[in-house]
Amino acid sequence: MSATIIDGKAFAAGLRERVGKLAGEFEAKAGRKAGLAVVLVGEDPASEVYVRSKGKATVALGMESFEYRLPADTPQEELVAMVERLNADPSVDGILVQLPLPKHLDEKAVIAAVDPDKDVDGITPTNAGRLVLGMDTLVSCTPLGCTMILKDMLGDFSGMDAVIVGRSILFGKPMAQLLLAENCTVTMAHSRTRDLPGLLRRADIVVAAVGVPELIRGDWLKPGAIVLDGGINRLEAGPGEAKGRLVGDVAFDEALDHVKAITPVPGGVGATTIAVLMRNTIVAAYRNEGLDLPDDTL
Ligand SMILES: Nc1nc2c(c(=O)[nH]1)N[C@@H](CN(C=O)c1ccc(C(=O)N[C@@H](CCC(=O)O)C(=O)O)cc1)CN2
């Protein structure tokens, strides 16, 4: 079987174009640009890259970017105080605290300090609860990107068996809620799951977000499955390589022989994350100004 390789970059480009138009219309209506504040604590190299890309994308789409870089030893109270200042700032529509935070910080308490109306990560207790209750809310970017891709590909996927590997607050848990809302039969697998190959062999949809390079082998997958790989794992650099290769949680080359469609790494669901963040920011901006979003294309 020759699988379709799902192009996350093309999906992201289309979404960015729609967000850019809405950002221009927002500025004309509100008399100001929509604004996204990103807070980075410490110097994790991957986080630095993501934060820089978020700032660039925000500006490129005609929105305002506010970037805050705090030292790795920032005390909890200082970080929470910064979040509270951003909550009160009317030029800020979206707030994102880049994760992971340094170990001494209480991640859950910091997230809980974000105003749910500005929570463009969709992970405050209020927004996580709203998602569970099936209410309209801001939703974590990568799982929302996965759901948008599935809707584009399949339209209706009611009744399909979906297995999610990984139970993080940013990915696995919101992904499960989104697939439940689409009437999938959802199973969550994780590090203590006893028979992962057995579960996966029954899955029409597999979403991997576990952070273990190429954990999921091709012959664990049901023929004709759709695989969304959210793993971004950098392998050790080989001889003569400056950097190791990026691979997902699924053994991609093996999977190609089994599945109907699969996202690559890089260029798959990870590549949609920042475009969806832009989408969440413009949605938050319209809502925060009490404006109706002009169309349904987001
Ligand atoms: N507060 C948050 N923190 C983190 C999130 C998040 O959604 N909110 N997600 C990840 C990191 N992340 C954004 O922050 C992110 C991950 C991946 C990509 C991306 O563009 N991936 C590319 C490859 C990138 C590369 O070459 O390294 C791809 O998969 O094609 C963007 C953003 C954790 N933290």
Image: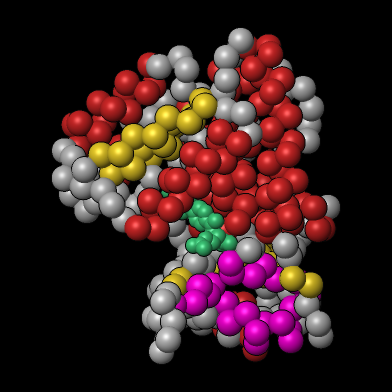
Residue closer to the observer: 131 or 76? 76
Question: Is residue 72 positioned above or below 222 on the image?
Answer: above
Q: Is residue 256 magenta?
A: yes
Residue 211 part of the magenta segment: no
Residue 126 visible from this viewpoint: no
Q: Main secondary structure of the magenta part?
A: loop
Q: Is residue 50 visible?
A: yes
Report the quarter where the N terminus lies.
bottom right
Q: Residue at x 25, y 26 (%)?
A: 81
Which quadrant would residue 23 be assigned to in this image? top right
Viewer-closest of 60 and 156: 60
Residue name at image x 77 percent, y 52 percent: 151
Q: Position of residue 237 (x, y in %)?
A: 40, 81
Image location (x, y in percent) of residue 145: 64, 50
Q: Residue at x 46, y 71 (%)?
A: 233
Q: Which residues are magenta?
A: 244-266
